[in-house]
Amino acid sequence: MRTAIIGAGIAGLACANRLVAAGHDVVLFDKARGTGGRLSTRRVATARGEIAFDHGATHFTVRSPEFRALAREWMQGGHAAPWPVAGLDAWVGVPTMNAPVKAMAAHHKILWSSHISAIVREDGAWSLYRASERIGPFDAVVVAIPAEQAAPLLSLLDFGLARAAMAVRSYPIWTAMFAFDRGLKGLPDFFKSRGPILYGVRGNARPGRARHEHWIVQADWTWSEAHIGADAATICRELLSALGQAGDIAVPEPFFADAHRWLFAQPSGSDAGHLWNAATGLGVCGDWLAHGYVEHAWRSGHELGATMTRGARSSSALPQDLARADGDADGPLPSIQSGSLR
């Protein structure tokens, strides 16, 4: 089975891992220039040297047995480490948050800077359009991108899948990044839910990070939505003030400040887990099918890959409507409340 996966975040990569392990041919397409998604890192050159800001997910939780096994592989490879400051089940990528997905991506064929504008099905096969270029044929297509981006691609192909995507709303998150010449005393290395701040993280306090005092400050989605049209300078000014108020301290002027707006940061989600139309070979996975968070996203792609390989091995046709995963032997995904965005 030759499969195209649109989206090379952790959900798309997890699906690819499962398919490749079963002997299938997989090509991933992503509009970004490199790995990360919401497990993103921005490297900034400053007069004090380069600083890597993990401006996406602040950390991720590890709770289900299968994901824990994968996290241990990452740790053995030097790509991740526990970070109990954020909770007993909290982990971070090492030396940056995108290290685990970089390790996953290294084993796959990925076409970066590839915005897929359309998917078509003709004569029982799938093709993708990247600008005016047609790429294919493929036996199956997996859409592993945010719901708001998935819905237009799916709308002319499968109403059930498109309707599932349209039923989900993703909330925005503003993230500010600050670097200082001295340490901020009076603040813990990690805190949450103080004023408009959802998470505050002293980046240099985490494993494998540079020594420069730098902070990642994520606003909650209510505040972010109210400030959706603001510019980065305004967001930095507001969140820098909120950072001082969170510790009741006078915050010095940072030598670097910037902000990033994640439009599709926190999905309202659903309980579907993943969706698969076996009759046409069209599937969907992602955190929005399981209420957000990194582990949810991985599980969604992992289980979709399992469903697809089971279908490929079966000689009998599955129902033409959407097939929801039955789950693996370790049972349904436990309730997960993670501190990550995706």
Image (cartoon, rainbow, N blue to C red):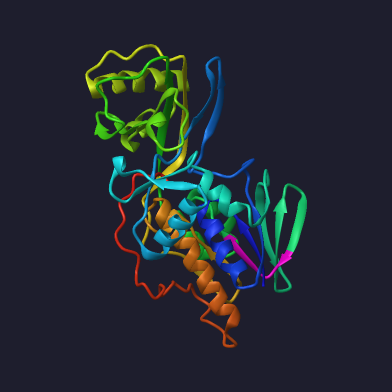
In the image, what residue occupies the spot 37% across and 34% down? Answer: 225
Q: Position of residue 36 (x, y in %)?
A: 54, 44
> Please, is residue 127 above or below residue 190 in the view?
below
In the image, what residue occupies the spot 38% across and 28% down? Answer: 227
Image quadrant in which the N terminus is located: bottom right
In the image, what residue occupies the spot 45% across and 62% down? Answer: 300
Q: Position of residue 327 (x, y in %)?
A: 40, 72
Q: Evaluate whether residue 7 shows in this view.
A: no
User: Is residue 298 highlighted in magenta?
Assistant: no
> Please, is residue 109 above or below residue 305 in the view?
above
In the image: residue 158, left or right of residue 139 = left
In the image: residue 286, left or right of residue 7 = left
Q: Position of residue 199 (x, y in %)?
A: 32, 35
The answer to which quarter of the image holds residue 330 is bottom left
User: Is residue 139 highlighted in magenta?
Assistant: yes
> Please, is residue 185 above or below residue 42 in the view?
above
Magenta span dominant secondary structure = strand
For this orientation, the residue located farthest to the right is 133
- Give the extent of the magenta segment: 137-142
